[in-house]
Amino acid sequence: MKKLKAPIPVLAAGCYLIDSHCHLDMDWYEEDLDHVLDRAKSQGIRAIISIGIDEKSSFAAVALAKRYPMIKATVGIHPHDVAHINSATYDRLRQLVAENREHIVAFGEIGLDYAKEYSPKNVQLQAFKEQLELAKELELPVIIHDRDAHDDCLTLLEAAAPFPQGGVMHCFSGDTHLAKRVLALGFYISIPGVVTFKNGKTLQETAAQVPLESMLIETDGPFLAPVPWRGKRNEPSYLPYIAEKIAELKGIPIEAVAKQTSINTQTLFHFTLNN
């Protein structure tokens, strides 16, 4: 007999969640985006941050934000793609921000990725420095990607500090020691669906200890779907599974997680939701 999947946790009336990191412009959502957003709304998701990872997706994220009131956009160049950019790329991003301030809430995701190393390390490091400065110039918070590059990433961030607009370490994959360094920068830590995995013990320990006031939650859709949807396409409507796991780890109601992480996301990205 086929095992039934656990139902999506239901929030109390008046409570909502915000997905702080999702890639809604990707092909995985092309055929049914309206349905994806409808399902998100039905599960209490009030806003979704759609993330720019290269020039094309940055423009696409802004286009989505213009089309759908619940979507906010970010712009930036992921470390996978920094080998293919130049100063003109940055100029076009500057113009995109200047013309769409009301829709763009952050710069990123930017950072380092040594797991795949699609761009050489030295190129990644230089582009990371440049984009951190550009984010400051544009007065936007930063969204940081750090995969298998903890020491270099944090060393560079600490050297570039302070960050007046703040930032977040997205899809956090470090331990509590790394979390302390991130928090010392005044950054938030964003918890993905990995926290629900059986092999996610390190992240579970970190999520239990990081103050709720310093936490965001994200799907990173279409990637990293939480249990019980692990291995399938992720989407914002699955965010309650992540909130539920964090609530379990902290011994608090899911509504407490939803309320505080939603406040945190709006505080970092400087937007408010209409009632």
Image (cartoon, grey):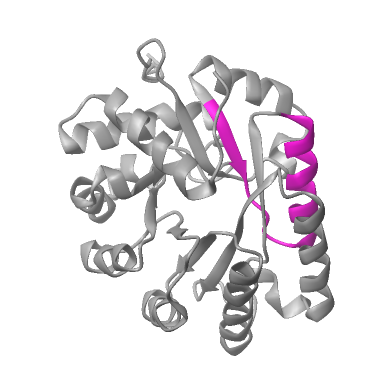
244 on left or right of 42: left
Q: Position of residue 182 (x, y in %)?
A: 33, 66
Q: Nearer the viewer, residue 55 or 5?
A: 55
Can you say which quadrant of the picture contains the C terminus? top right
Q: Which quarter of the figure has residue 47?
A: top right
Q: Position of residue 252 (x, y in %)?
A: 19, 29
How many marks are shown on the rendered structure?
0
Residue lying at the far top in this picture: please name it: 13
Q: Is residue 56 visible?
A: no
Residue situated in front as seen by the camera: 181 or 219: 181
Q: Is residue 48 magenta?
A: yes
| Point 64% across, 29% down: residue | 70
- Residue 112 placement (x, y as % from top left): 52, 74
Does residue 185 appear in this view? Answer: yes
Up the image or down, 174 lies above or below 198; here it is below
Quadrant holding the N terminus: top left
| Residue 159 sits in quarter | bottom left
Q: Is residue 71 above or below residue 86?
A: above
Q: Residue sitting at 63 percent across and 80 percent down? A: 130
The reply, left or right, for residue 62 in relation to residue 24 is: right
Q: Residue furthest bottom?
A: 122
Q: Is residue 26 magenta?
A: no
Residue 115 placement (x, y as % from top left): 49, 72
Stretch of the chain drawn in magenta = 46-68
Using the image, determine if residue 108 lies above or below residue 195: below
